[in-house]
Image: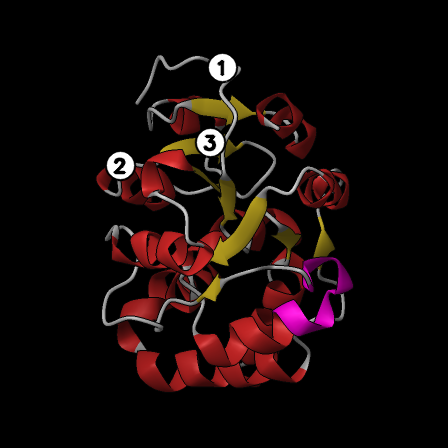
């Protein structure tokens, strides 16, 4: 839908979670560094783990273990990281600047909003519950809610159905290429969260989203 009217209003906003609504990188990085410590490997800096934070446990472990990653017990380490993360899931995590104002404006204008993330439900649910600003989400769909996850369009279509809104009247906001791919496949408008864990601005712009937001408050134009 690239090239659409920038002033279009929507019946619903759907958000990715990590790197879009919430800055969760330090809690994820903390879990990673606990795993590395157990393996007698030096911790990694925020500048190393932050870009991988939207891409799941394996991506985090790969940047931590580096060239050792192909030779380790990957499934066991993934579970160890998830266990550590679940223990301290919302110590540092918080809404990005501007998110709370955007959500409040959506609610004031009776625009529905929900969350669709590839994060598994056993992590999504306690994290969302721990952030008061997310309490009014009208739909929360996790990576394992259905048998498929992004970039499949099905979770986004499912979220739109939960919100009782036609997908073509929804805007999906995310910080990964699979977010934009899923939105396009769902016949949904898309916006790139350039404040998130994007590899680079140039790379993110190449994904071809309908909108590229510098900050969450860029969303006010669509309310």
On screen, 82 above or below 146?
A: below
Where residue 121 appears, as percent x and y from the top left, is 46, 76
Asked if residue 75 is among those painted magenta in the image, a careful observer would answer no
Asked whether 126 or 171 is in front, the reply is 171
| Image disc number at residue 6 | 1
Q: CA distance from mark 3 to mark 2?
A: 13 Å
Category of crowding for the residue at label 1, using alpha-carbon neighbours closer than 10 angstroms: few (below 14), some (14–19), many (at least 20): few
Q: Is residue 177 visible?
A: no
Q: Quadrant of the N terminus?
A: top left
Q: CB of mark 3 within 8 Å of CB of mark 2? A: no
Sooner in the amino-acid sequence: mark 2 or mark 1 = 1
Q: Secondary structure at mark 1?
A: loop
Q: Position of residue 93 (x, y in %)?
A: 71, 61
CA–CA distance in space, label 3 to label 1? 11 Å
Report if residue 72 is visible in the image. yes
Q: What element does badge 3 sit on? A: strand
Q: Residue at x 66, y 26 (%)?
A: 220
Which secondary structure type mostly characterizes the magenta part of the structure? helix
Q: How many dots with numbers? A: 3
Q: Position of residue 105 (x, y in %)?
A: 72, 38
**Circle nearer the N terminus (3, 1):** 1
Q: Tell me how far mark 2 sits from mark 1, CA to CA.
A: 17 Å
Q: Nearer the viewer, mark 3 or mark 1?
A: 1
Q: Nearer the viewer, residue 73 or 186?
A: 186
Q: Quadrant of the C terminus?
A: top right
Estimate the x, y position of residue 78 in percent, counting from the top left: 41, 78
Q: Which residue is mark 3?
A: 191
Q: Which residue is mark 2?
A: 187
Tell whether 125 sits left or right of 161.
right
The magenta stretch is 128-135
- Mark 3 Cα shell of 10 Å, populated few (<14), some (14-19), many (≥20): many
As helix, strand or loop, the secondary structure at mark 2 comes to loop
């Amino acid at each position: 839908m690239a090239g659409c009217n920038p002033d279009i209003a929507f019946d619903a906003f759907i958000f990715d979670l990590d790197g879009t609504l919430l800055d969760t990188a330090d809690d994820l990085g903390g879990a990673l560094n606990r795993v590395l410590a157990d393996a007698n490997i030096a911790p990694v800096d925020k500048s190393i783990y932050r870009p991988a934070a939207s891409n799941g446990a394996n991506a985090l472990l790969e940047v931590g273990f580096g060239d050792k990653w192909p030779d380790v017990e990957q499934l066991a380490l993934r579970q160890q990281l998830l266990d550590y993360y679940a223990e301290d899931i919302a110590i540092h995590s918080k809404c990005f600047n501007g998110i709370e104002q955007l959500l409040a404006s959506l609610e004031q204008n009776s625009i529905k909003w929900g969350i669709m993330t590839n994060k598994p439900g056993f992590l999504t649910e306690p994290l969302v519950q721990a952030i008061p600003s997310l309490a009014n989400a009208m739909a929360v769909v996790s990576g394992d809610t259905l048998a498929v996850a992004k970039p499949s369009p099905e979770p986004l279509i499912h979220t739109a159905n939960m919100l009782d809104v036609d997908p073509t009247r929804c805007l999906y906001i995310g910080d990964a290429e699979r977010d934009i791919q899923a939105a396009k496949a769902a016949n949904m408008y898309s916006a790139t969260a350039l404040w998130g864990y994007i590899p680079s601005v140039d790379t993110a712009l190449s994904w071809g989203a309908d909108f590229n937001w510098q900050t969450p408050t860029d969303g006010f134009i669509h309310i």
